[in-house]
Amino acid sequence: DVKVTQSSRYLVKRTGEKVFLECVQDMDHENMFWYRQDPGLGLRLIYFSYDVKMKEKGDIPEGYSVSREKKERFSLILESASTNQTSMYLCASTTGAGGGYTFGSGTRLTVV
Amino acid sequence: GIQVEQSPPDLILQEGANSTLRCNFSDSVNNLQWFHQNPWGQLINLFYIPSGTKQNGRLSATTVATERYSLLYISSSQTTDSGVYFCAVEDLYDYKLSFGAGTTVTVRA
């Protein structure tokens, strides 16, 4: 089975800190995604990537950036964390072309 | 983007009961998946079902792509079935998933 690993289950960061959320998949998938999940708002796409060094904005990219230097790793970066970025962050990967998505276990980020 | 509507929003079941969850979507799609979100927040893939019917134990799913809906059936429900069930569809032109708002299922012993 495809495994998608997120480096932290829980994180607490201070306002203004630079935060890195890491995601690694082990099945050579081309496509990787970052979502955030908030009560009442569901899952919303932040950024995605179809290949190494490629990135595309999702529906809510403001305040975030991403990095994909290697195919298996997709990092989400909060340049200057704010309290409204407190959320559950979910990473996913897929082969594309009709292949199913696999999600990581999620990172609950709290910004204080 | 594609609109995804799930119903009902909440469902309370007695252990052993059967239930049906519905997902309607607004446009043709490449793929449809059903997920179960466990209490720790992880999304567990239940079915990848762009069309047709699949079964996995007490769970089964049917997608009628031409009519743009999918159904998830839970039979003989157990307390471990509790959680949020999401339907998500993949756009025809890219690989982005659009999620429904979910159905929260509570199974009582």
Image (tube, coloured by chain):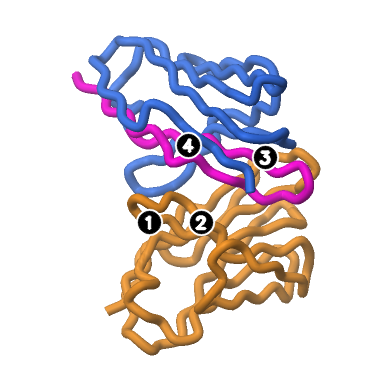
Chain colours: A orange, B blue
Q: CA distance from mark 2 to mark 1?
A: 9 Å
- The residue wearing badge 2 is A44
Judged from the image, the secondary structure of the residue bearing numbered disc 4 is strand
Is there CB contact under 8 Å for labels 2 and 1? yes
x%, y% of residue A66? 62, 75
The three-letter code of the residue at mark 3 reads: Gly
Whether discs 2 and 3 lie on one chain: the answer is yes
Q: Residue at x 37, y 80 (%)?
A: A82
Q: Nearer the viewer, mark 3 or mark 4?
A: 4
In which quarter of the view is residue A49 placed?
bottom right
Q: Position of residue A42 (x, y in %)?
A: 43, 50
Res. B76 image quadrant: top left
> Which secondary structure, mark 2?
strand
Picture quadrant of residue A5 = bottom right
Residue at image mark 1:
A38
Given residues B44 and A54, the one toward you in this image is A54
Task: Kindly identify which residue carries mark 3.
Answer: A100
Q: Which residues are magenta?
A: B83-109
Instruction: Give the residue type at disc 2.
Output: Arg
Alpha carbon of mark 4 to alpha carbon of mark 1: how far? 14 Å
Q: Chain of mark 4?
A: B
Q: Chain of mark 1?
A: A
Within 10 Å of the Cα at label 1, are there few (<14), some (14-19), or many (20+) other Cα atoms? few
The residue pinned by badge 4 equals B86
Majority secondary structure of the magenta segment?
strand
Does the CB distance between marks 2 and 3 fall below 8 Å? no
